[in-house]
Amino acid sequence: MIAGGPVELLLGVNAEGKSLEEVATPLTAVEASKGCCWKDSCIGHAGPRTAAPLTRTDPRGHSRAMEIDELTPAELQVWQAFPRGTEVDFRTAPGEEATAGSTWGPERTLRAEVLRTLLLNGPRTAGETAVLKVTGARITGRLDLQYATVDCPVHLWACYFEEEVDLYGAQLRRLSLGVSVLPSLHATSLRLDDSLRMTLCRVRGPVRLAGARITGAVFLDRARIGEPAQESDDAPAPPGTPAPPAPNRRREDVLQLNGAVIEDHLSARGLTVHGTFRVHGTSIAGTLDLDEARLDCPAGTALRGTRLAVGSDLKARYLTANGELCLKGAAIAGTLDLSDSRLDNPTDTTLHASTLSVGADLHAMRLVSNGRINLRGARIPGQLNFAHASLANPGGMALRASSLVAGELWFREARPIRGTVSLRRAQLDLLHITPATWPDEVRLDGLTYTTLAPHEPAERRLALLWRDKDGHIPFSYEQLTTAYRRIGDDGAARTVQLAKQRRHRSTLPPYARLWGYVQDAAVGYGFRPVRAAAWLFSLLLIGTLAYTAEHPRALKPDEAPAFNALVYTLDLLLPIIDFGQESAYTPTGTGFQWLAYALIITGWVLATTIAAGVTRTISRQ
């Protein structure tokens, strides 16, 4: 074998100026059988290319050549395996986790500077693909690949990193850090020609991938990013002592993908994030999968996805979020699925999705939301489905969906909503909700819908309109009337119109309300014509019986027609029409005279109210 340091290897001479061919030692039988010659690399027989020099940095920050004999046995093993892409597995048992990596000894410890040199200028073997493939190692020092271009895949699986991995501005082919433990990852503006895999990773600090461009997919399944907020257990400070800073409950953006471009899927099933998951302005060509994820940022923003763009579906089934989910202005080409999820942010917003655009449906079946859901101005051409859901924000807004445009809004078998619901100016083709689901306070001004389901008696639907915080909203009554007429229930439509007049009456001054009571009692504002007939028949019967018992006196006995009590009473009741009885006879006695006056006045009132009601009905139709 050849003796000498890396510089001599590169120059092809030894320290005395002699060629390496002159000082080469004979090969052993084993080396000869492996095809090794003096031209091969001295490290691992990497092939017909000389080894690149190793460099290391001294405490003063100066780089110097690292001698081959400075590599530890573990590092030498990785160096030898790299040119052929062979995996080096340091685990002592299958499935061993890296959480105890701080206790691992030198037999499985690698220096980050060695890995850096290997990636940037490591040996190559003709006809082989170099791959850094290490499993179960402890990596000391800071792996610094800022602005580096690495042309081989990097697989550091189930490894324990003592310091941050810095990939700022780097360009890599593929990166796998699955099942590893890291203090943090700085990969802002990273460029990846393939996928990023961090499945089952444990990262105590932030993962920065802002502005990254990843050609393949990103895998964060069952990873854990950040650490739970710790409440202070210290004893109270003495009086006059400045109070310490409050615990950082909001914490930083621990998972940053803002502005990133992912040209495939982002899979984060079972992901746990303690802090803010930031995907502001992120573009994901495929599916964003957050099924069974846990986003924990109490009193803060758990997911910041303003202007997020997803080319397929956003799956967040069985998601648990403690904090706000912000999808303001997001565009999701497929379906947004929040079914069976739980969102907690009491007295604040759980889901902020104003101006959200969804290409298909928004599923929220069996969703539990403790806080405000904001869907103002959202566009959902398919279903917005809250079936079996529980929405609660007592004393505040439980659902704000003003200016919402959706195909169908479903609350089938949902629990009674606690908190205010605002559907002002919303446009729906179908609204499916039972009267029992509505909360005590609503805001429905401008709400339009084509179909209202399930079919309920008008009396049950009308109670809701009295609970509108904006007071009397005539449009709400007209919209309900139209819905009943569309399905052919004219009786329910008339009931709604009568309720509208009664509600309007409550807003009038006293003298106008009095006339309204008269119209209501007489003919139900024209919507109860049978009531007018009942009044007419009753008065006719009373007058007929009274004047049969006591005939009125004829004014001109010789010219008066024969008296008829029924016709005489009709002549008193019906204005304009003259049967000749009223002008020919006059009641005798004060009581009968007042009865005649009452019949005349009542007749005019009935005629006026009937005319007003008929006119109102005709003009409405």
Image (cartoon, helix red, strand yellow):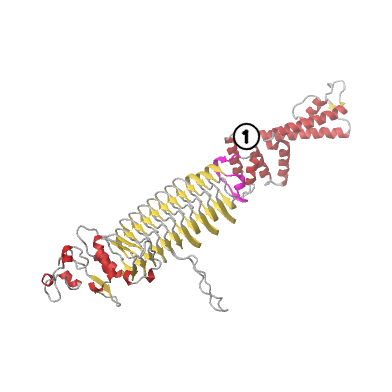
| Side of 176 where 500 appears, left or right | right
Q: Position of residue 601 (x, y in %)?
A: 78, 35
Q: Work out which quarter of the rendered image holds the N terminus and state it.
A: bottom left
> Could you tell me residue 582's position as x and y percent?
81, 27
Q: How many marks?
A: 1
Q: Taking 583 as reference, is 36 above or below it?
A: below
Foreground of the two, 138 or 357: 138
Which residue is more in the foreground, 94 or 514? 94
**In this view of the protein, can residue 96 be seen by the observer?**
yes
Outermost right residue: 589
For the C terminus, the image quarter is top right
Q: Residue 582: in sight, yes or no?
A: no
Residue of label 1: 490
On whether residue 69 falls in the magenta region, the answer is no
Q: Is residue 453 magenta?
A: yes
How crowded pointer 1 is (Cα within 10 Å; few <14, some 14-19, many 20+) is rated as some
User: Which element carries disc 1, helix, strand or loop?
Assistant: helix
The residue under the point 42% across, 49% down is 313
Lateral position of residue 449 relative to residue 159, left or right: right
Q: Whole-percent x and y of residue 332? A: 43, 49
Tell me the quarter of the picture where residue 121 sits. Answer: bottom left
Tell me the quarter of the picture where residue 283 sits. bottom left
Label 1 amino acid? Asp
Question: Which contiguous range is marked in magenta?
Answer: 433-455
> Residue 221, relative to residue 577: is it above or below?
below
Which residue is found at the position 71% from the left and 44% from the top?
A: 513
Residue 250 location in percent, x, y? 49, 65
